[in-house]
Amino acid sequence: MVESKPVASGVRWPKSNWEIPDQTMTPTSPTDFVVSAEQVQKFEADGFLVVHGLISADEVNQYRQIYDRFLSGQIACDQMRSDLGGHASPNKPGVENVTQIMWPSDFVAGLADRALHRRTVAVARQLLGEDIVFDFDMLIDKAPRTDTPTPWHQDAAYWPNMPDTRAVSGWVALDEATLDNGCMWFVPGSHRKELRSHQAAGKGGGAKVCQATEAEGVAVPLKPGSATFHHGAMLHYSRGNTTDTHRRAHIVNFRPQAMVEYERRCGFDHGRSGNVTDRKVRNMNLQEKT
Ligand SMILES: O=C(O)CCC(=O)C(=O)O
């Protein structure tokens, strides 16, 4: 059992004064989530892990309500919103191909202290160690019929080089994730090989792409409330959404506390301070600011 600890110290509240409407996700709801030794071994071997039932159906409904306020603009977060599929031609006028909203927990007071963040950090610590802490979170939505794949990539290719490369993302499905709406695909074991060479996916947007095919990977459909955890060097991708409904995912990223402090000392904060180039940076070597 992992002791629950605050996961996002120093968070800047609130750019929105919107309050979570009921108490379903109070900080007193169970926050621990235990994975087995076999699951830890599987994560080490494969570089990703499927965790069923991370949050309950009631909690999923609560997170969907919050999510839809972001998507509709009721929670104003324009500076954190972009089209991760901006490299592809627009498929639906006025709708992003792939909506990406960075740092949602900055916009809803207390969000980072509730079930989704608490349980993802509990799992992340069991997978990578007790020094693992929250780094940043994001929403990635594929709206109906936007039909835009998220290009094959490794998250580490977006980040600066780190002395300690432990990193894990908890990708929590708020809708059923299927082959047709863009469930995640992973290439087992790719986290233990050299990072592949990445290029800009196209002219618009900040997405990167590397060479990989579905034939190398496995698709991971998920029920709402279930999650995948993938290593920062895991090769992954998702197909476009060809269905009539949204594919909403809330993603929380973790790394060792010392590495979060190192990133921040170097001025790298995953776009939090409005520096969108943070999201486009390709494995530069950081300079610590004194
Ligand atoms: O949701 C997606 O389609 C992509 C997610 C992703 O690339 C990530 O969580 O690192």
Image: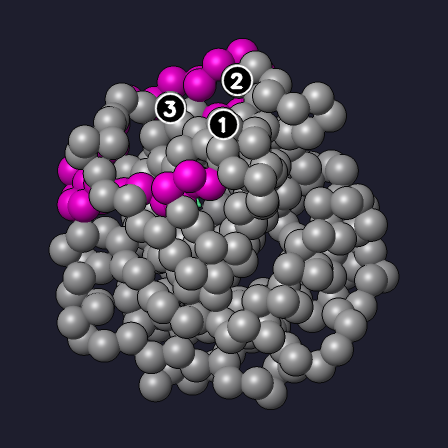
Looking at the magenta stretch, what is its main secondary structure?
loop
Name the residue beneath numbered marker 2.
88
Q: Give the mark, 1 or 3, whose residue is nearer the N terminus.
A: 1
Q: For the residue carrying disc 3, how many other residues have a C-alpha within 10 Å: few (<14), some (14-19), or many (20+)?
A: some
The answer to if 191 sits in the magenta stretch is yes
Q: Give the mark, 2 or 1, whose residue is nearer the N terminus.
A: 2
Name the residue beneath numbered marker 1.
148
Tell me residue 194's x, y (percent).
19, 33
Q: Which residues are magenta?
A: 179-207
Q: For the residue carrying disc 2, how many other residues have a C-alpha within 10 Å: few (<14), some (14-19), or many (20+)?
A: some
Secondary structure, mark 2, is: loop
Query: Which of pointers 3 and 2 indicates the residue nearer the eye?
Result: 2
Tell me residue 248's x, y (percent).
56, 49
Residue 187 appears left or right of 167: left
Amino acid type of the residue that numbered disc 2 sits on in the rendered structure: Ala
Name the residue beneath numbered marker 3.
209
Q: Quadrant of residue 40?
A: bottom left
Amino acid type of the residue that numbered disc 3 sits on in the rendered structure: Val
Answer whether residue 161 is visible to the viewer in this image. no
Secondary structure, mark 3, is: strand
In contact (CB < 8 Å): disc 2 and disc 1: yes
Answer whether residue 245 is visible to the viewer in this image. yes
Residue 189 appears left or right of 119: left
| Quarter of the image where the N terminus is located | bottom left
* Residue furthest to the right: 17
In contact (CB < 8 Å): disc 1 and disc 3: no
Q: Quadrant of residue 290?
A: top right
Q: Which residue is more in the foreground, 143 or 271? A: 143
Q: Residue at x 79, y 51 (%)?
A: 75
Label 2, label 1: how far apart the Cα atoms are: 7 Å
Does the closest atom of ligand 1 sit within 8 Å of the Cβ of label 3?
no
